[in-house]
Amino acid sequence: DSPIQYERVGADVTMKCGSMDWDAAVTWTVNGTDIHESLLNGSYLILKNANLSQSGQYACYEGSSWHLKYQTYLRVGMPPKEPVLMCRSNNYPKGFYCSWHLPTPTYIPNTFNISVIHGTKDMVCERDAIPKNRCHIRYLQLFSTVKYKVTLTVTNALGRNSTTLTFDEFAIVKPDPPESVVAKPVPNNPRRLEVSWQNPSSWPDPESFPLKFFLRYRPLILDQWQHVELSDGTSHTITDAYAGKEYIIQVAAKDNDIGTWSDWSVAVHATPWTEEPKHLTTEAQIT
Amino acid sequence: MAAADSPSAALRRRDLCSRGIRLAGKMRVDVIDLLDAYVERQGLDVSSLDSSVAAVEGVPLAAVERWDEQTGTQRLLENLAAYRAFRALLAQMLEEQREQLGEADAGLGRALASVLLQVSAFAYHLEELLRLESRGVPGEEEEEEGEEEEDRPPPPPRLSIFEQKLRGLGVLRELAQWAVRSARDLRQLSKPSPATGTASGLAESP
């Protein structure tokens, strides 16, 4: 296996043919294809202003014998920019997770290192297998006013960068959206829609840590949402729907006391009950 | 434990718990408003103070490990000890605030007094819950663990005005955390126990 050589995009790269003298006759190849001698300075290969497409397997052969004198795998890439880090507790009070990504790709392998400090205590954030840019941590204490400090460092062969988040236990609590949202018309009620949903399955103990909900709905033909906040229960009857109009309905959740609202649930559609026109029914009965 | 398990006791417990939860909720909202006013009126720059405010002496910390494993009695006793301490701390803050700001900030004084009242009411609520469980309500003297007069530590030196303000900030921050914890504790207490049909945690022996 040939060694890997990492160079920055835009750098000027000089490759020497092993221990061969500058004036030795050599042939360079990239990915098995000969490189034109115009790119050579003596036996050195010069790549000015390296670009990503120049990544590949480079090899140098002695002129007459075709002995392989040098080989390297060139990877052109970039040092990492400041990573984007996010931490959230969607399973309070069990713990929280942090996930991250780079704002722009580096095109070369990166390693990520995360540290979590609570006051003076170091905590271990266990890496998830999938997705691999995520780790989770169990709360050892609850109701603490001491902040958590999470530092993520990203390193590659061309440099390193890091970012730090500081937050308190309550601030990052954000449940997943409610699940199984269902909206149904109410028979013989042209202005009602019955909506029901379930607590997100990731929320471990809704009895001790109840969620409150925010419902929004509008007819498809209008842009303005109606909102209802519900402090308990997982159902609600809309009583002011426009007769015969199809509605779009979504629900969000929040811990009763702390944290922020979840994202909106998947939208459901429903149309209130309408009375069948009598003459059509009669015709159907005849045929 | 027959008295604790009777249907009327269970109803009374549930009633006390749900009222307590509402009290804790209101208390939290008021404490957070008071915290904002306190920071502003006392001229405190919170961002530079974070590390200094941690673990101010004498302020009961809401932070707890293995919270989910606590028994009902433990929850009640820890809450009661905390709110009794807050009652004394808030009374002291009220006194200090009057000395420092006098009549210049009657609004802050009124807000402090209102929170003090709610804290006292909550402490009484907790005592009622403990009595319901036929648990002796610890007297406040007992909480000093029977120290002899001669063995008591000397009274702490009087704090500087800045130190008083810092402690006040610590008191209000921890109280806001306690208000959340207490609501959670009471919800745990009011959960029916699957085996006995009584509130979980309270049917257990000490």
Image: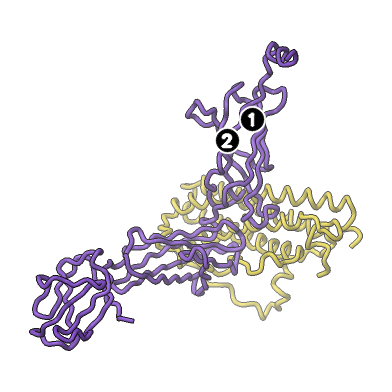
Residue B24 x/y as whole percent? 65, 51
Quarter of the picture holding the N terminus of chain A: bottom left
Q: For chain B, what colour was chosen?
A: yellow
- Tell me how the rendering is colored: by chain
Residue A117 x/y as whole percent? 48, 71
**Type of residue at label 2?**
Ile
Residue A232 x/y as whole percent? 67, 43
Q: Which residue is mark 1?
A: A238
In the image, farthest residue toward the right:
B2
Residue B137 lies left or right of residue A127; in this view the side is right
Residue A85 lies left or right of residue B146; in this view the side is left
Q: CA distance from mark 1 to mark 2?
A: 10 Å
Q: Secondary structure at mark 1?
A: strand
Observer-nearest of A62 and A65 = A65
Observer-nearest of A87 and B160 = A87
Residue A240 x/y as whole percent? 62, 25
Residue B119 at least partly seen: yes
Q: Residues within 10 Å of mark 1 (few under 14, many from 20)?
A: some
Q: Which residue is mark 2?
A: A249
Residue A120's disc number: none
Q: Which chain is purple?
A: A
N-term mark: 1 or 2: 1
Label 1–label 2 contact, CB within 8 A: yes
Quarter of the picture holding the C terminus of chain A: top right
- Number of disc labels: 2
Observer-nearest of A114 and A13 = A13
Residue A6 at least partly seen: no
